């Protein structure tokens, strides 16, 4: 939870670093906007876990479509949706963060809102150094993850501020509950206006990832006017 020393906030620095990673900051923000717009169209007739899932899914879809002309493509290792560059050495996924996401004045780094599964945890371990090479299954996972540098497009929906705060960050540590808490680098992307539509959530809820298990995402929705 300590502050990341490698924090990029200045526009020139953000744009330069994203260019090094073969990414476009405007495309990443547009992908978040598409996810927010899809979530805002939810109604009481949708399943209760759908709003968080559709935000996550449409953001991934948008990022893939917008970056496709520059060689990025979708892959699904063990069922996990990733975007990977043409060289195959940089990959990222989308996740919901906590209220510290996208902030530069917080005393602590952001944390993923929901615990991560074994595939993501393996990718984070590969970023920071593998600890269980003696196990055959872990060795296979380690070798697969070491093919690419793993990043996360992190987003937090703030009802209070009326925006979605976003950052593109490189995770290096997962806590005992499966939440990512430490990052070797954070690239602050900025904010996207919050498209509320007919969707309403409990205070402090920032949207959701695809659910890890039944009942994980708890939301309130109301019919659009």
Image (spheres, grey):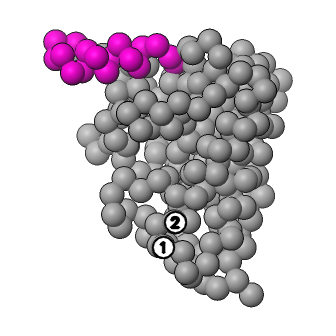
In reply to whether residue 140 is colored magenta, the answer given is yes
Mark number, residue 47? 1
Foreground pick, 73 / 14: 73
State the image coordinates of residue 223 (x, y, percent, origin top left).
64, 85
- Looking at the rendered structure, the secondary structure element under dot 1 is loop
* Residue 165, above or below 205: above
Image quadrant assignment for residue 44: bottom right
Are discs 1 and 2 less than 8 Å apart at CB? Answer: yes
State the image coordinates of residue 170 (x, y, percent, origin top left).
53, 27
State the image coordinates of residue 208 (x, y, percent, origin top left).
51, 57
Mark number, residue 3? none
Residue at the (44%, 37%) spot, across then down: 80
Q: Mark 2 points at which residue?
A: 50
Residue at the (46%, 66%) spot, across then down: 49
Q: In which quarter of the image is the N terminus?
A: top left
Q: How crowded is mark 1: few (under 14 residues within 10 Å), some or many (20 or more)?
A: few
The answer to whether residue 152 is visible is no
Q: Range of the magenta residues?
A: 133-149
Q: How far apart are marks 1 and 2 (CA)?
A: 5 Å
Foreground pick, 201 / 9: 201
Residue at the (53%, 49%) spot, across then down: 96
- Looking at the rendered structure, the secondary structure element under dot 2 is helix
Is 147 displayed left or right of 222 in the figure? Answer: left
Q: How many labels does the image show?
A: 2
State the image coordinates of residue 60 (x, y, percent, origin top left).
61, 43
């Amino acid at each position: 939870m300590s502050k990341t020393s490698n924090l990029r906030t200045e526009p020139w620095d953000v744009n330069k670093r994203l260019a090094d990673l073969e990414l476009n900051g405007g495309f990443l923000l547009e992908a978040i906007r598409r996810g927010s717009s899809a979530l805002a169209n939810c109604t009481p007739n949708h399943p209760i876990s759908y709003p968080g899932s559709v935000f996550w899914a449409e953001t991934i879809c948008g990022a893939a479509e917008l970056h496709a002309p520059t060689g990025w493509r979708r892959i699904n290792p063990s069922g996990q949706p990733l975007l990977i560059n043409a060289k195959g050495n940089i990959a990222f996924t989308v996740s919901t963060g906590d209220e510290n996401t996208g902030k530069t004045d917080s005393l602590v780094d952001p944390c993923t809102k929901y615990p991560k599964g074994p595939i993501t945890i393996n990718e984070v371990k590969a970023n920071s150094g593998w600890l269980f090479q003696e196990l055959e299954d872990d060795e296979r996972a380690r070798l697969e993850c070491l093919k690419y540098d793993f990043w996360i497009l992190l987003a937090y929906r703030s009802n209070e501020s009326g925006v979605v705060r976003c950052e593109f960050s490189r995770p290096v540590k997962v806590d005992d509950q499966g939440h990512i808490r430490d990052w070797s680098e954070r690239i602050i992307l900025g904010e996207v206006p919050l498209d509320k539509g007919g969707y309403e959530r409990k205070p402090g809820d920032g949207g959701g990832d695809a659910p890890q298990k039944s009942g994980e995402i708890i939301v309130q929705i109301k019919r659009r006017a």
